[in-house]
Image: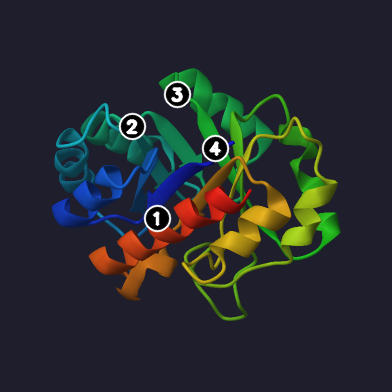
Amino acid sequence: MKPDIKICGLKTPEAVKRAVDRGATHIGFIFFPKSPRNIEPDIAGQLADAVRGQAKVVAVTVDADNDDLDEIVDLLKPDMLQLHGSESPERVLTVKAIYGLPVMKAFAIREASDLEKIEPYIGIVDRFLFDAKPPKGSDLPGGNGVSFDWRLMQSLDEGVNYMLSGGLNKDNIAEAMAVTRAPGIDVSSGVESAPGIKDLGMIDAFFDAVREAGRRT
């Protein structure tokens, strides 16, 4: 089965268009000031409007309060909220009740025990995102360009809907897909020439690698 593909941390109309033209099913906009991919909600809304309906628009936040979410939802009009902080199951339920949007909850993975943390969220979140734990000293919960042991995904219940993230790029995506059979993949730094700078050629190369990997399975 062909996986969903999310290109995250988009900031320019050229990158948004290229991602969608190449077949991205999801496009992500990051609202986290410490990130080099941070974007203002009004600008993100303009970028999303140009391709709305062609891919699902995802708002990525980190422990955002209701005031911030109000502004993001109003200006971006996302199809999904991605919560990439330490949001509790109760917080997820509250967010879903307020905004009426599906929620993707991110978890940082390094070892098998990290996957046990998803248990209280099963049946609450609409999708999980599994990212690598940040390197020591990093202020970013994601987008660090590091991977984790993908074999850990083989122990997941087949009913868990998730996106695989963390250090994916054109050189390792075939292996990642073969090992995990992930129903979705998420890439950000792996298609950048510098932090926060999406490279159109690297986006092309990533989609080419995904397509080639799909032919082998």
Q: Quadrant of residue 112?
A: bottom right
Q: Earlier in the sequence, mark 3 or mark 1?
A: 3
**Front residue of this view, candidates 78 and 210:** 210
Check if mark 3's residue and mark 4's residue have beta carbons within 8 Å.
Answer: no
Quarter holding the N terminus is: top right
Crowd class of label 4 (few under 14; some 14 to 19; many from 20; radius 10 Å): many
Cα gap from disc 3 to disc 1, whole angstroms: 28 Å
Q: Secondary structure at mark 4?
A: strand
Q: Which residue is mark 2?
A: 78
Residue type at tag 3 = Leu
From the top left corner, tell me how far across and down residue 167 is, in percent. 54, 68
Task: Name the residue at 46% across, 60% down.
Answer: 209
Q: Earlier in the sequence, mark 2 or mark 3?
A: 2
Toward the front, the furthest residue is 216
Residue 85, relative to residue 190: is it above or below? above
Crowd class of label 1 (few under 14; some 14 to 19; many from 20; radius 10 Å): some
Residue type at tag 1 = Phe
Check if mark 2's residue and mark 4's residue have beta carbons within 8 Å.
Answer: no
Residue 104, numbered circle: 4
Residue type at tag 2 = Pro
Q: Which residue is mark 1?
A: 207
Q: Earlier in the sequence, mark 2 or mark 1?
A: 2
Cα gap from disc 2 to disc 1, whole angstroms: 24 Å
Check if mark 3's residue and mark 1's residue have beta carbons within 8 Å.
Answer: no
From the top left corner, tell me how far across and down residue 154 is, in percent. 80, 50
Cα gap from disc 2 to disc 3, whole angstroms: 8 Å
Q: Earlier in the sequence, mark 1 or mark 4?
A: 4
Task: Name the residue at 70% across, 52% down.
Answer: 180
